[in-house]
Image (cartoon, helix red, strand yellow):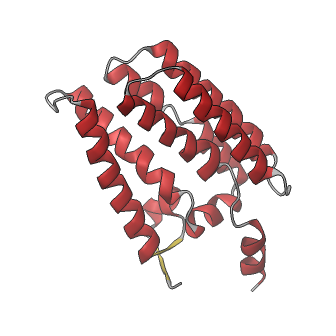
Amino acid sequence: MKYFKTPEFLYEVLGEKQSILEVSCTILFALIGSWVIYSLADIELGSWQTIVAYILIADVLAGCIANFSFGTNEFYSKKPKNRLVFISIHIHILAIAWLLSEPMDTALIVWGFTIASAFLVNALKGKSIQGFIAANLMCYGILLLIYMSLPVWFLMVSMFFMIKVLFSFSVDHFDKQTKVASEI
């Protein structure tokens, strides 16, 4: 696959290099997924709160895909402290719940489970069990979300938030390929 150098201000989002295919898929999923969620939520874009919440939802969806890309994975693989900061600052689900008047206790449970799991998975970097543990925790997270009986749109956002932070971002998906690429 052919990669291009991304602008420096997008490094934290797309890494230092990215492919047209990966960027296109990220944007397409963010747009289509956001449209579906916005349609299900049936909330008018009449206030600053809803506009900010919808931007955060689009960010969650875009990150869900972008964090699986080689460029983003490679960028954070080389910067383990940045990966910890990235996990730490992900309060999107709390902000979305607050902005759209969803119960904060539910959002705190989703956020707490996701962040704690992400830190655990991140600590397993370089170990062959990392992907398995992440998938296992993701499945428990899905059970938790279904058990909480959330509105469908908030269930979707919560699930994509978990995928983004816990599985898509915290797992080093290209560990061996990144090591080989850096040796070349």
Between 106 and 71, the one lying in front of the other is 106
* Residue 69 drawn above or below residue 45: below
Position of residue 183 in the picture relative to residue 9 (left or right): right
Q: The C terminus lies in which quarter of the figure?
A: bottom right
* Residue 46 drawn above or below residue 32: above
Position of residue 157 in the picture relative to residue 168 (left or right): left
Between 39 and 113, the one lying in front of the other is 39
User: Residue shown at 36%/53% (left/top)?
Assistant: 30
Position of residue 55 in the picture relative to residue 129 (left or right): left
Q: Residue furthest left?
A: 46
Residue 145, how many percent across, how many down? 54, 28
User: Residue shown at 57%/60% (left/top)?
Assistant: 68
Residue 140, how many percent across, how many down? 67, 33
Residue 73, how many percent across, how many down? 62, 62
Q: Please give the count of numbered marks on the rendered protein.
A: 0
Tell me where residue 53 sits by quadrant: top left
User: Residue shown at 45%/61% (left/top)?
Assistant: 10
User: Residue shown at 56%/22% (left/top)?
Assistant: 147
Residue 7, how many percent across, how many down? 43, 69
Between 73 and 84, the one lying in front of the other is 73
